[in-house]
Amino acid sequence: MFFKYSLLLLAGSLLWQPAQAEVVLSASPSNCVTLQQGRECHAQIQASWNTPQPVTVCLYLDEQQLQCWRNLTSAQWQWHFTDVQSRQLILWQMTPSEQKQHVLATTKIEVSWVQSAHKKRLWRRF
């Protein structure tokens, strides 16, 4: 009998929990292609984010701060990406004293290449 009531209470509490709205972070393009492995990849990236309520956030590329916004529900930002490897975009919620509070969302900018850096040349020029 106790087990039945416990199960009912558990099921009821799961049904009454408020649904958490999703924070969305996107980057376009999310893939940067270079000719050969190890060469810098260049792309004009547009990042955008949406939150269900106004927040103060900062956008980071790994540990590098790119841009911050105060009390907004969405924003877009564009910059020139230059790197030889894939990087993580992180949207941090900030405290009033502008310290990192917690991660709201992440996405990745993938760097890929057409040819491997270790490909052996089959011809030589004299």
Image (spheres, helix red, strand yellow):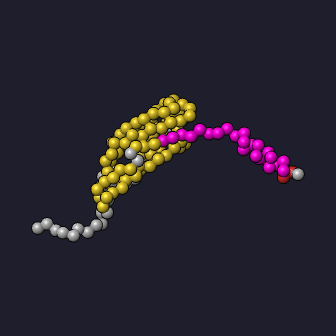
User: Is 17 situated left or right of 97 in this image?
Assistant: right
**Residue sitting at x 30%, y 66%:** 118
Where residue 61 appears, as percent x and y from the top left, is 42, 45
Q: Residue at x 51, y 43 (%)?
A: 105
Quadrant assignment for the C terminus? bottom left
| Left or right: 76 in relation to 103 | left
Q: Which residues are magenta?
A: 4-25
Q: Looking at the image, which residue is at 59% across and 38% down?
A: 21
In the depicted view, which residue is nearer to us: 104 or 46? 46
Residue 15 part of the magenta segment: yes
Taking depth in this image into account, of 90 and 73 the one nearest to the observer is 73
Image height check: is 93 above or below 111? above
Query: Which is more toward the observer, 76 or 97?
Result: 76
Hey, which quadrant is residue 20 in on the image? Answer: top right
Instruction: Using the rendered image of the protein, determine whether residue 64 is visible from the camera's viewpoint.
Output: no
The image quadrant of residue 60 is: top left
